[in-house]
Image: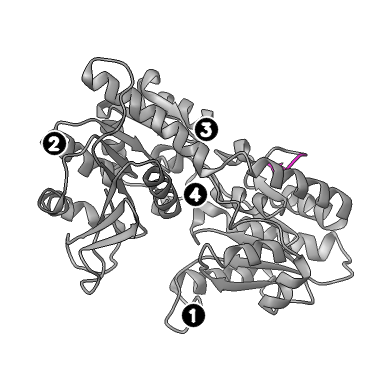
Amino acid sequence: MNVYVRETSRELARRGVLVHIFTRSQNPSIPRRVSLGEGVDVFHVPAGPERPYPKDLVLEHLAEFVRGVLTMARGPYDLIHSHYWLSGVAGLELRKSWGIPQVHMYHTLARVKNIVARNTAEMEKTPRLNWEMELAREVDALIAPHPLERAQLVWHYQAPPERIHIVPCGVDTSVFHPMDPWEAMKSLGIEGRRWAIFVGRLDPIKGLDILFQAAKILRDHLGPWDVPLGVMIVGGTKAEDGIASSLEVVGLREMARSAGVEDMVIFVGPKSQEELPLYYNAAELCVLPSRYESFGMVALEAMACGTPVVASRVGGLAYTVIHGETGLLVPEGKPEELAQALAILFRERSLRNRLGERAAQRARAFSWRRVVDGLMEVYGRVLGRAEGSGPKRLEAPIAWMGETQRGFSL
C-alpha cells in the first residue's frame, strides 16, 4: 500500500495534480511537512503516541488525527482518496467538513479475510466490519483492483455496482526487470542453492505454514535434487542490526523447525524496492501460498523480473498470474499440490524460462502510468457528478489517505 500511494502520487504530480498525503506521525523528530518530490507533500500528523503502535489502537486516536488534518491542511482540495478502512473513516469526517467527494480503496476486505481465517485470533473485529460497510454505502466511488474484488464488494458489502471502478495496481519496470541470475546470487552471497522466494508480510494469511510443508515434500519425496533447494523469506521487522529478529520471525523459525525444513529456509528481513529486484532475480521462482490476496503486487514485481510465480488461486493472484503462461496456480491450503507445482518448475528449465519471459511481457502492461490513467478517469467522473456536469479536470490539490504499516495517511 505504501508503494501504491507513493507511485501513484508521483505520477499524478507529473501530470500537474498537486497531492497532499496525510499520515500519522510515528517519530516526533521528522518534520511535519516533507516533500516526496515536486507536487507531492507528506504531512505527519500527531495522533496518539508518536511511535509505532498496534493498528487496533489507531481507531482510539482517529478524532485527533482528523483535527490535526484540518489544522495542517493546505487546501482547498478537489477530492479525498482514502486507502484502507481507518483512513476511510477519517475521510468520511473530512468529506463532511470540506464538502468534497471521497474515493476509497480497501486494499484488503475484512469479511473475506474472516472467511479464510483459521481461528478467532486471525479474524478482524466488529468495528472494522461495520466501518467497511459504512464506507461502501457512503463514499462517492470505490476502486477495486480486479473484477473479483468488485463482485466481493457487491456480495459482502452491498456496495452499489455503479460506484465500483476497476483499476489494477502497477509496477515500475525501470526498477523491476530481468538481470543475470548468477550475478544476482553472487552479489547477495547465496550461491550453492536453487532458490524459491517469498516476499510479503509475515502474517498467517500469507500461508507460510503451507509453504514449509510443501518444502518438506519437495525435498524428501520429489527429489533427489542435484543442487540443494532453499526458500528465501523476505519480509518482517528489521532490527537495528539489519537482521529480521522480531517475534513473528521467531515463531516462523519454530514453525520451519517443526516442519523439518529449518535448514532449507533463510529469513533475510524486509528489503527496499531498490534491493528487491536482486532477490527476485536470484530466485528461480516466486512462491505465494496466500489464503487471501487483494491484488498481489509481489507477483507483479516478480513477473517484471522474469521470475515465474507459483501462487494460490485466490483473490487478485488469480487475476495477476495466468496459469500456464506466467506461472502456475494451485488450490489454496494444499501443500502436496504446491510442492508438485514447485517441482515442475525446478525440474523443467525450458518451461521456467518460457513462463519467465511471458511474465515479464505481461508485467509491462501494468505501468503506473496506466494505473493513473484509470484513477484520473474515476476522479473526473466523480467530480463531474459533484458539479452536475460531465467529467471535470482537477484544478486544486487532492488529499490522499492511506494506511501505513502502523498508522494511517490521507
Name the residue at 22% across, 74% down.
29
**Toward which corner of the image does residue 284 lie, by quadrant?**
bottom right
> Which residue is denoted by mark 3 in the rendering?
146
Q: Is residue 276 visible?
A: yes
> Which residue is denoted by mark 1 in the rendering?
242
Q: CA distance from mark 3 to mark 1?
A: 36 Å
Q: CA distance from mark 3 to mark 4?
A: 25 Å
- Residue 20 belongs to magenta span: no
Mark 1 vs 4, N-terminal side: 4
Q: CA distance from mark 2 to mark 4?
A: 42 Å
Three-letter residue code for mark 1:
Gly
**Toward which corner of the image does residue 96 lie, by quadrant?**
top left
Q: Is residue 331 visible?
A: no
Q: CA distance from mark 1 to mark 2?
A: 43 Å
Q: How many marks?
A: 4
In the rendered image, residue 328, in percent from the top left (x then y), is placed at: 73, 44
Name the residue at 12% across, 48% down.
70
Give SS at disc 2. Answer: helix
Q: Residues within 10 Å of mark 1 (few under 14, many from 20)?
A: few
Discs 3/4, front: 3
Which contiguous range is marked in magenta? 324-330
Q: Tell me whether circle 3 and circle 4 mark residues in contact (CB < 8 Å).
A: no
Q: Residues within 10 Å of mark 2 (few under 14, many from 20)?
A: some
> Which residue is denoted by mark 2 in the rendering?
98
